[in-house]
Image (tube, rainbow, N blue to C red):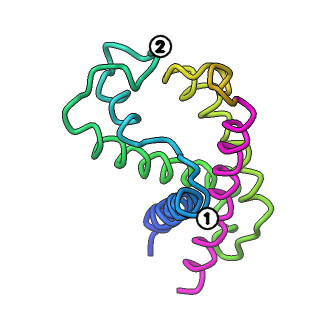
Amino acid sequence: MSTVMIVVVIGVGATLCIDLWTTGLRVALGVRSLDYCLLGRWIRHMPGRFVHADIAAAAARTHECPTGWAAHYAIGVSLAGGFIALVGTRWLAAPSVLPALAFGVVTVVIPWFVMHPALGMGIASARTRAPTRARLKSLGTHLVYGVGLYLAATIAAMR
């Protein structure tokens, strides 16, 4: 399998781990996560508008749900590509958990400083009702992404 295909598999696997994690939180504890339809709405409003006061109040756009879900997985694959570019392809032969976890944690800067402000939540969710909770939820989700990178790479290495 080519390195590009391995990156795709690892990115999809890590993103799937996020989805399993957030589904588990929702079912077990009633904790809601980002609605990927709103991510799609934000994308579908581009290039005309990048920052919104409240993306949920913005006009709905056609195909926003499939756009959001596709973007969610494309972002996961892109981040996996960035991770492999950073650690090198040798990591794929013998994945270790610490670099993957560290990368997952570092990627939380994307929602905190790009997504949250653009969706109207403020920097690092400062404008939400419970900023600390939202920050911890984002951090936990990105930590799970790091776990997913490691698990998916470990499975891919068994091929």
Q: Main secondary structure of the magenta part?
A: helix
Q: Is label 2 in contact with label 1 (beta carbons under 8 Å)? A: no
State which region is magenta. Answer: 131-159
Q: Which residue is mark 1?
A: 148
Mark 2, other Cα within 10 Å: few <14 / some 14–19 / many ≥20: few
Q: Position of residue 18 (x, y in %)?
A: 55, 58
Answer with mark 2 or mark 1, whichever residue precedes in sequence: 2
The amino acid type found where label 1 is placed reads: Gly
Residue 115: mark in rendering: none
Residue pictured at 49% horizontal, 63% vertical: 16
Where the N terminus falls, by quadrant? Answer: bottom left
Residue pictured at 61% horizontal, 64% vertical: 148
36 is within the stretch colored magenta: no
Q: Which residue is mark 2?
A: 53
148 is within the stretch colored magenta: yes
Residue pictured at 77% horizontal, 52% vertical: 102
Question: Which residue reaches farthest right?
Answer: 98
Q: Is residue 26 or residue 58 the one in the foreground?
A: 26
Using the numbered discs, state the Cα–Cα distance from disc 2 to disc 1 in whole angstroms. 32 Å
Q: Position of residue 100 (x, y in %)?
A: 71, 59
Q: Is residue 4 left or right of residue 153?
A: left
Q: Is residue 33 left or right of residue 37?
A: right
Mark 2: secondary structure: loop
Nearer the camera: disc 2 or disc 1: 2
Q: Position of residue 68 (x, y in %)?
A: 36, 42
Mark 1: secondary structure: helix
